[in-house]
Amino acid sequence: MSRPRFHLAFAVADLEATERFYVGLLGASVGRKADRWIDFDFYDHQITAHLVPGPVPPPPTNPVENHKVPARHFGVILDFPEWEALADKLKNAGVRFLIEPHVRFPGQVGEQATLFFQDPSGNAIEIKAFRDQDQVFKA
């Protein structure tokens, strides 16, 4: 393996709706699956949806630039053109954003494009992009 892959497991209320969302909307592919879980290749990382009884509790939030950022979320950092294309795709699909696509920290170290939305079970997802990839970890 040339680069480590990240693995994340998360709770969902409906496996079929989850599969439609991650595959159909976000372009993930299905790996292994069973009656109560399903693996996805999500931008070359393994995420696993586990079926749980009842609703998935909403995450608490933290204020960031006048937005309520879900404290529990996951996502990917894309190249800027890919981020713009996905933002347009999500808008055209009628996705309701928790935080609309915008540029955070403009003109500052760490300037980034970001957007937040939820999967069918309420799991928060952030997709972001940096024009300067060297700023991903800059303070």
Image (spheres, helix red, strand yellow):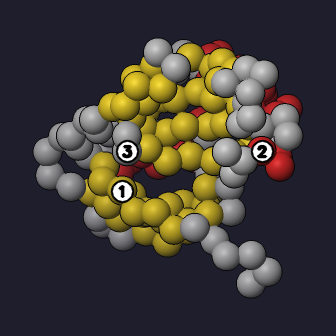
Q: Nearer the viewer, residue 25 or 83?
A: 83
Residue 59 horizontal side relative to residue 88, left or right: left
User: In this view of the protein, can residue 85 be seen by the observer?
Assistant: yes
Q: Is residue 39 above or below residue 123?
A: below
**Residue under the image location 14 percent in, 52 percent down:** 53
Q: Residue furthest front?
A: 139
Badge 2: few (under 14), some or many (20 or more) residues near its Cα, within 10 Å? some
Camera sees residue 82: no
Q: Mark 3 or mark 1, which is nearer the start of the sequence?
A: 1
Which residue carries the number 2 mark? 135
In this view, the residue in front, 64 or 81, is 64
Which residue is drawn at the image coordinates 42% and 37% (left, top)? Answer: 124
Q: Which mark is residue 72?
A: 3
Q: Which quadrant, please, contains the C terminus?
A: top right
Label 3 SS? loop
**x and y, in percent, of residue 55 in the image:** 18, 40
Mark 1 lies on residue? 10
Q: Is residue 30 above or below residue 105?
A: below
User: Which label is found at residue 83?
Assistant: none
Q: Amino acid at mark 1?
A: Phe
Question: Contact, CB < 8 Å: mark 2 with mark 1?
Answer: no
